[in-house]
Each structure stands twice: as C-alpha cells, then as structure tokens.
Image (cartoon, helix red, strand yellow):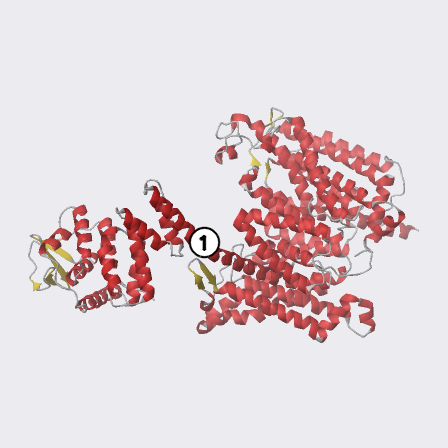
C-alpha cells in the first residue's frame, strides 16, 4: 500500500486524537503539575530541562502525560514562560488544559535528540501505569535498556498497582536493575539478589557491566555480582545445551535427507553419484519456480506453495535422474570409479545449465508465513518453525523410503536385484527397469532434500557442491546398504558437529569431524553396521 | 575390478630407451631448449603451467592407471608443494612488501609479531626443496599406511582422499593456520635473490619444468617396466590373487602412493613461481578430480597419454575460457562423460584402435 503524505497526516492526527482521549480517560491522576514545573521542562538549558522532566515523571499526572506527548509531536509553543499545546489550530494551556488564545509572540520549543530520547523514556515510564496490559509490557521492555534510579518512584507506583503476576515479576526485575546502580550499598546487594533469580541473557550482561572495576569497587558487592552471574549462567546453560542439541538435530535431519537418496543410489545400487548434490539443486530451483508461479497466478494460496512444490520437486528430480540413468549411468554399472568421473561431469554440466538459466547469483526463496518465526522455549532458546518442519519432514521421508523398500513389490525387486542381479533376472524381474526406478527414486529424494534446503539456506548453482562431501561421509560412515546406519550416521554427525562448533568454531569443527571419519573408516572400513559376508573383495 | 582388466598394457619387457622413446626425447628436448626461448611471454607461462599439470597427470597415472587406486587428493599434494615453495618466495620478498616489514604482508595485517613455528627455515632454498617433497611424502605415507593397512580400496579410498583434501582446504582457508587465508601467497618478487618477473626467469623456469617432466617420465617408465611395476599392475587387475601369491601389497601400494604424492609436490613447487599465486582453491575437490580427467582423457596405463591429456584439456581450457567462457563447464562435463563412456583408454587408446584398423585393412 502506498502511503501518500495526506494519508500519513490523517493517520497522525487520528493517533493524536486517540492518545488525547486515552490519557484523558485516566481519571485517577490529580492535577499536581505546577506552572513552575512546566516552565522548567519547556524552557532553559537542556540539562535543566531533562532534570526537571525526570523529576516530574516521579509524580506522574495527566497533564504531564499530555505535555510530554505534545512535546514529542512538536506541538508545544512557549510565550512569556508559559507553555501552550497547539493542536488543530487550537491552543490550550499546558498546566490547566483550558483553551486559550495563543499569544502572538509564541515560539516553537527546540528539542535536540537527547531531549527527545528522554521524552520517549518519560513516555514509556508513564505508560507503565496504562490500563492496557500490552502497553505496560512494552513500557517495561523499553525502560529495561536505560534503567536508572530516578524512575524508581514510578516503578514503585506501578508495582503497587500491577495485578498481572507475570508483569509484576518483570517490574520487580526492572526495579532491581535500577537499584543495581543505586548509590546505597544495601540497596545494590538487595537488587543483585533479586536479579540472580532471572534467566535472561540481558540481565547477565547488565550484571557483567556492573562488574567492571569502574562501575563497582565494593568487594562485597563484587562478590555478590559474581555469584549472581554464576547463578544466571546455570540457568542459561540449559537453554544453550538444548539449543546445541536442537541445531545438531536440525543439521542431522538435513544430512539425513541428503544422504537418504545416496543411501539408495550408492548404498543399494553401488552407483557413486557425484551429481547427487546437483539433483538437490534442481529440487531447490523447482521450489523457486513453483513459488514464483504461485506468486503470479495464485497469490491467495501463496502460503501453500511449499506443499505443492514437494511432489513437483520430487517428480522433476526423479525425471532428470531417470534420464541420466538411461543415457549415462546404465553403461557404467560395475565400474564405480568411471561412474564417479562421469557423474562428476554431469554435475558440472547441470551447474552450468542452472547458471545459464537462472544466473550465477542466488535466487530468493521465501518461507511461507506459517514456517517463519519460531517457538520460544526459554529466554535464550527459540526453535525456528522451518527447522522443526524439516526435522519432521526428514523422518516422514525416512518412513516412506523404509516402507517403499521393505513393504512394496518395487522395494522387493530393488533388494532382489541388489543382492543377486542374475538370479533376480531369472525370476522374471526386469532388472534394467528396476535400475531406472531405483535411481529415479534416489534422485527424487534428492529433489525433496533440495526442496527442504530451500527453506533454510541459499538457493544457487553451488548448493549441491557444499553438501556432497558431507553426504558421502554420512553414507560411508553409516555403511553401504544400510538405511539404519545412514540414519544414525546423519544424526550423530549433525550433533557431533554442532557440539564441536561450540568448542572450536565452525571450520575447525568440520575439520575435526572429517578427520574423525577418516580415522573411523580406518578402524571399521565397512561403516558402523557392516554387512557380514565371506567375500574376500568385500 | 573386471573393467580395469581390460586395460591391458602392451608393454612387453623392453629397454628403458627404445627407438620411439629416443626420438620422442630428442623432440622434447629440442622443444624445451630451442623453441621455448623464442615463444611470447604468455605462451611461455602457459606452457610451463601445463607442463606442471602434466607432471600431476603422470603422478596420477602411476597410482590410478597402473595401480588402480583413484586418488581424489592429488590436488592437496600439489598445493602442499606449492605452499612450501610459496613460503620461501614470501621470505624472499624481504622488506619490499607493502608494509616494509621482515614479516610477510598478511602477517603484518593480522598483527603478528613473529613468524609462526612452521615457517622456521623457510628462508633457506635447500630446506624448501626438502619440504617440497617431504611434506606431501610424509602426509601421503602416514595417510596411506593407515588406509591401505585397513584394506580401504576402490571408491572408499577415493572418497576418503576427497574428504582429506576438503578438510585441508578448510584448514588453509583460516587465517590462523598461517598461510595467508583465502588470499594465499602472491606478489612474489625474487627467487634465489634473482627478480622473478623477468622474461629470462620465466623462460628458465619453463625450461626447468620441461626437464623435470622429462626426468619424471623416464623415472615412471623405469618404474612401470621393473618387476615392481609389474606387481603394481597385478595389484590393479586382481589384488586378491597377488595377496594369495604371497606378496604384501601394502608396501607396494604405499610406496607408489608416496612417490606419486611427492611428484605432485614437485609439480606444485614449479607451478607457484610461474603462476605467481597459490591459494587454498588448489585444494578444492574439483581441482583434484580434474587431475584424474587429464589422465583419463590421455589414456590410463600409458605414460605418454596423461601428458597428452594434460596438454589437451588445459589447452582447451585456456582457449574456451577466453573464447566461450559460458561453455567451458559444458565442454569439461561432456569430456568427463564421453571419455568414460566411449574412450575408456583415452586418446592413446583411440590412436591404437585407428592404427589397428589401418593395419587390419592392409593385411
């Protein structure tokens, strides 16, 4: 929607009206504000004005709220030490609220940025007493960032009136945060004890700031500060731990999705498909195209484009996979090294194809609204919906693949051909067709992985390259021909990677994991779950 | 392993120098000494660069073509040799860098006060020469010992070497590693206190590279014709039988693997002063796979094939990336597919087939 200046002006006016009526409907305030106070706030040096303002906020009343509001809107004029609020061409006296004629020598008052931020603060402080719960909550949040002792009386007032238990606790914390900076040692200690019960990163950094030698010199208070920080750490650490486990599970589920397709093409068929990543890339680009189609033709159903793109991404990647199998891979069965090189060639061509078609830059894929945002568990732990969805999706695909391989006729044939091609052929299985189906299935699952990846990462021609080493590691670690091994390896690697990241940083973590895999393979060349057999060539 | 068995080598035990080799050597030496000095600058550098790649392809051929082990980690050995040389070249810059410091520029930039421990001795050319072969050699030996002892082979070995290269690339991308991060080393000024960016230095480096290539070709020829080389080919065709016959294949595979890695290290060391830069991009998995395709295009299990392949692919690359940059990846990709599908024995195999047809027609 385009906002023309007219509309903006109208909205502003409307807001003013609302605010005026809002403050006017707060009858409990007495008219304590005096002409002197108003004069002090509106005229003189900025420092004096700010002092006057903070003092006045300590004893809030209706007229003060009206004045602050007007000052924020630049609607205050002064003449001969009196302040007037001028709105819609009508002037009222700032002290009494009575409509008066504006003196001809009235001037605008000038508020610099410092005064403005103080005004905003004061306004937030005043809305602590608002009857609206969410307005109070917002005010507490706003005040938290610049808590100082001067607003204490106001907080006390708000505390006395507050009925909502949750807000009351927050107010108490806010009060403590203000008291931590108090000049009275006993008050500081009391405040620190109150803050130690908090579990928020913000409080921790507040306490850490106080622990600076320049901020706090008393050893007793310093000790209290240190133990309070420790207590908060104890609470935060759980959030962090769970966060690591969650991001590990998230990475693991992505690896699982990527590796599931490989587990079929490599694990079952023995085809090293270096173009697997590029089949994922095709799935991701398909999602991008579907998204654009929805945006153009079905904007009302845009939120559901991702649902539609799942089967389409599967189908497109599976078709490309089937075509590859028929034209190239078919001729290379039993020659794994040659397959590796040929599929690498395919991947180079697919990358260039995408570059030529969609450009070398990443393309934007939007999350549908129901996948954006997150689910807050703790103050320092929010689980993004898209990650949760991918974990669920990965296990859904895993279930489908499991059922397909173990419970269907196609799966039976695939297993049969894998175990003994000649015998399966003798039993009447069209092994060539089964090969195509199986490869297309693996490719289609790669497409699903790409569709899921488009929701959490960049979609570009290099998408596949960044996952191919990881995904082969998963399959190799899990053991060939093993779905269960793939699952354990994917989740294990994901969690291990994220835990190490906490210790060493992302790059070193990755290196350590790769070295770990290399060493592990030395010990158990067949992966976690080795198939038992008697072949010397195994 | 059935397919590699089709790669029958025609090499009947013959002398190190038969007539064909003598003629080839004479031509190669003539090119190196008589033609190179008169080439334009651009072609001198290009030729030098491609000959470095040819050494890599030759090394790859020894381990893949003759022993049947596809390494996707030769880019790492190449880069290690290059980095060893690069350290020396960085020290040769002396105080001529941007910051006029004894330390390389990137260290000044990172606010380092002294050289890290692994730069010890990098100012000595002789020590650098040792590092160039020892670094890749030791890494290959240790890695290979554990890999071959666990009987990792085939595609597993390829993938593990790829992971190793990938991990090394990530490591070298970090500034903390002390190798200039993603910028690597560049802006060299001198080698052996002689300015590096002169035509005569370029020609000398190119000639040296050519001589090294010829020497490595002869070494490789000696290796594959020896009894040791015959065992390597037997391992390629049927390792189990070799084992059952009583050979310990571990040491055969490990030694050729280490030799191959050291050859790549030398190639990298020759490459860096000519191209003037080394960065972790040389360790990317793609770079290592390309080495394999040079060998495959030329013809595995022949010695001249990989050299031809390196010239063909890299010549095509420098032409394509100028003329049709869009189509280079299509061409390279198609080359991978075409060679594996239609030309399993590469250009040399094709030539042999054509000659066979002609002889057949005559008969």
**Residue at x 6%, y 52% (from the top left corner):** A80
Looking at the image, the residue that sits furthest to the top is: B193
* Quadrant of the rendered image containing residue A135: bottom left
Determine the residue positioned at 45% across, 63% down: A377
Q: Is residue A83 left or right of residue A240?
A: left
Q: Judge by depth and name the residue closer to the eye, A491 or A78.
A: A491
**Snapshot quadrant of residue A441:** bottom right
Vertical placement of residue B314 versus A410, above or below: above
Residue at disc 1, secondary structure: helix
In this view, the residue in front, A330 or A502, is A502
Quadrant containing the C terminus of chain A in the rendered view: bottom right
Q: Is residue B273 visible?
A: no
Q: In the rendered view, tell whether residue A88 sits above or below residue B94.
A: below
Where residue A227 appears, x then y in whole percent?
40, 49
On screen, residue B298 versus residue A350, left or right, reads right
Chain assignment, label 1: A
Instruction: Looking at the picture, tell me which residue is in the foreground, A326 or A168.
Output: A168
Total marks placed:
1
State the image quarter where residue A453 is shown.
bottom right
The relative height of residue A300 versus residue B21 in the rendered view (above or below) is below
Pointer 1: what residue?
Answer: A234
Return the residue nearer the eye: B272 or B162: B162
Question: Which residue is at the far right?
Answer: B363
Residue A53 in picture, x, y percent from top left:
18, 53
Circle 1 residues within 10 Å: few <14, some 14–19, many ≥20: few
Q: Position of residue A417 (x, y in %)?
A: 77, 68
- Residue A245 versus residue B304 in the image, above or below: below
Which quadrant is the N terminus of chain A positioned in? Answer: bottom left
Q: Residue at x 76, y 35 (%)?
A: B216
């Amino acid at each position: 929607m385009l906002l023309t200046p007219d509309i903006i002006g109208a909205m502003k006016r409307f807001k003013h009206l609302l605010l005026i009526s809002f403050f006017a409907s707060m009858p409990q305030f007495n008219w304590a504000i005096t002409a002197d106070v108003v004069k002090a706030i509106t005229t003189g040096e900025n420092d004096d004005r700010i002092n006057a303002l903070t003092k006045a906020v300590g004893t809030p009343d209706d007229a003060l709220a009206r004045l602050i509001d007007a000052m924020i809107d630049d609607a205050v004029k002064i003449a001969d030490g009196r302040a007037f609020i001028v709105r819609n061409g009508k002037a009222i006296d700032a002290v009494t609220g009575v409509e008066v004629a504006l003196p001809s020598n009235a001037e605008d008052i000038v508020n610099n940025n410092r005064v403005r931020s103080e005004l905003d603060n004061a306004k937030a402080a005043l809305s602590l007493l608002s009857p609206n719960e969410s307005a109070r909550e917002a005010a507490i949040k706003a005040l938290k960032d610049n808590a100082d002792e001067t607003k204490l009386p106001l907080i006390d007032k708000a505390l006395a009136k507050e009925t909502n238990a949750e807000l009351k606790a927050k107010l108490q914390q806010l009060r403590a945060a203000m008291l931590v900076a108090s000049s009275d040692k006993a008050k500081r200690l009391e405040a620190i004890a109150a803050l130690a019960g908090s579990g928020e990163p913000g409080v921790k950094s507040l306490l850490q700031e106080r622990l600076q030698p320049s901020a706090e010199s008393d050893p007793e208070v310093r000790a209290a500060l240190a133990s309070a920080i420790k207590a908060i750490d104890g609470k935060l650490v759980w959030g962090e731990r769970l966060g690591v486990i969650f991001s590990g599970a998230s990475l693991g589920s992505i690896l699982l999705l990527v590796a599931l397709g490989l587990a079929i093409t490599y694990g079952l068929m023995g085809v090293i498909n270096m173009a697997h990543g590029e089949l994922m890339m095709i799935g991701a680009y398909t999602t991008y195209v579907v998204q654009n189609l929805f945006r153009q033709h079905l904007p009302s159903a845009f939120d559901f484009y991702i649902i539609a793109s799942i089967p389409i991404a599967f189908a497109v990647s599976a078709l490309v996979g089937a075509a590859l199998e028929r034209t190239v891979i078919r001729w290379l069965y039993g020659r794994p090294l040659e397959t590796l090189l040929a599929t690498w060639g395919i991947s180079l061509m697919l990358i260039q194809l995408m570059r030529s078609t969609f450009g070398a830059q990443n393309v934007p894929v939007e999350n549908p609204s129901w996948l954006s945002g997150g689910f807050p568990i703790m103050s320092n732990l929010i689980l993004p919906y898209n990650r949760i969805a991918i974990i669920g999706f990965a296990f859904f695909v895993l279930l489908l693949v499991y059922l397909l391989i173990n419970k269907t006729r196609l799966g039976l044939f695939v297993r049969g051909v894998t175990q003994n091609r000649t015998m399966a052929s003798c039993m009447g299985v069209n092994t060539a067709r089964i090969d195509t189906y199986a490869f297309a299935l693996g490719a289609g699952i790669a497409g699903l992985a790409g569709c899921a990846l488009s929701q959490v990462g960049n979609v570009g021609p290099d998408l596949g390259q960044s996952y191919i080493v990881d995904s082969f590691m998963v399959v190799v670690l899990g053991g060939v021909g093993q779905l269960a091994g793939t699952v354990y390896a994917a989740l294990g690697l994901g969690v291990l990677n994220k835990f190490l990241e906490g210790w060493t940083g992302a790059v070193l973590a990755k290196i350590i994991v790769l070295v770990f895999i290399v060493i592990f393979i030395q010990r158990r060349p067949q992966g976690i779950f080795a198939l038992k057999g008697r072949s010397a060539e195994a | 392993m059935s397919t590699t068995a089709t790669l029958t080598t025609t090499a009947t035990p013959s002398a190190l120098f038969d007539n064909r080799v003598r003629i080839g050597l004479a031509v190669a030496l003539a090119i190196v000494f008589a033609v190179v000095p008169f080439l334009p600058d651009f072609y001198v550098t290009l030729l030098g660069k491609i000959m470095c790649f040819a050494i890599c392809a030759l090394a790859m051929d020894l381990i893949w073509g003759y022993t049947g082990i596809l390494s996707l980690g030769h880019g790492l050995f190449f880069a290690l040799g290059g980095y060893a040389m690069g350290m020396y070249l960085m020290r040769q810059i002396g105080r001529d860098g941007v910051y006029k410091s004894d330390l390389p520029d990137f260290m000044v930039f990172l606010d380092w006060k002294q050289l890290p421990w692994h730069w010890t001795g990098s100012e000595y050319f002789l020590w650098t020469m040792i590092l160039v072969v020892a670094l890749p050699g030791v890494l290959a030996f240790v890695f290979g010992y554990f890999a071959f002892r666990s009987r990792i082979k085939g595609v597993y070995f390829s993938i593990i070497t790829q992971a190793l290269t990938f991990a090394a690339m990530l490591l070298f991308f970090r500034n903390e590693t002390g190798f200039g991060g993603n910028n690597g080393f560049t802006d060299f000024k001198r080698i052996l206190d002689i300015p590096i960016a002169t035509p005569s230095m370029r020609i000398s480096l190119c000639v040296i590279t050519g001589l090294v290539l010829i020497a490595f070709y002869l070494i490789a020829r000696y290796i594959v014709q020896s009894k040791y080389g015959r065992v390597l080919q037997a391992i390629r065709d049927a390792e189990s039988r070799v084992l059952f016959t009583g050979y310990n294949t571990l040491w055969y595979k490990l030694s050729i693997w280490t030799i191959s890695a050291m050859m790549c290290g030398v190639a990298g060391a020759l490459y860096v002063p000519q191209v003037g830069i080394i960065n972790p991009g040389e360790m990317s998995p793609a770079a290592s796979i390309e080495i394999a395709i040079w060998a495959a295009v030329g013809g595995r299990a022949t010695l001249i094939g990989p050299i031809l392949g390196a010239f063909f692919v890299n010549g095509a690359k420098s032409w394509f990336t100028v003329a049709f940059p869009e189509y280079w990846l299509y061409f390279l990709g198609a080359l991978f597919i075409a060679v594996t599908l239609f030309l399993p024995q590469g250009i040399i195999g094709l030539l042999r087939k054509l000659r066979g047809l002609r002889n057949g027609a005559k008969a």
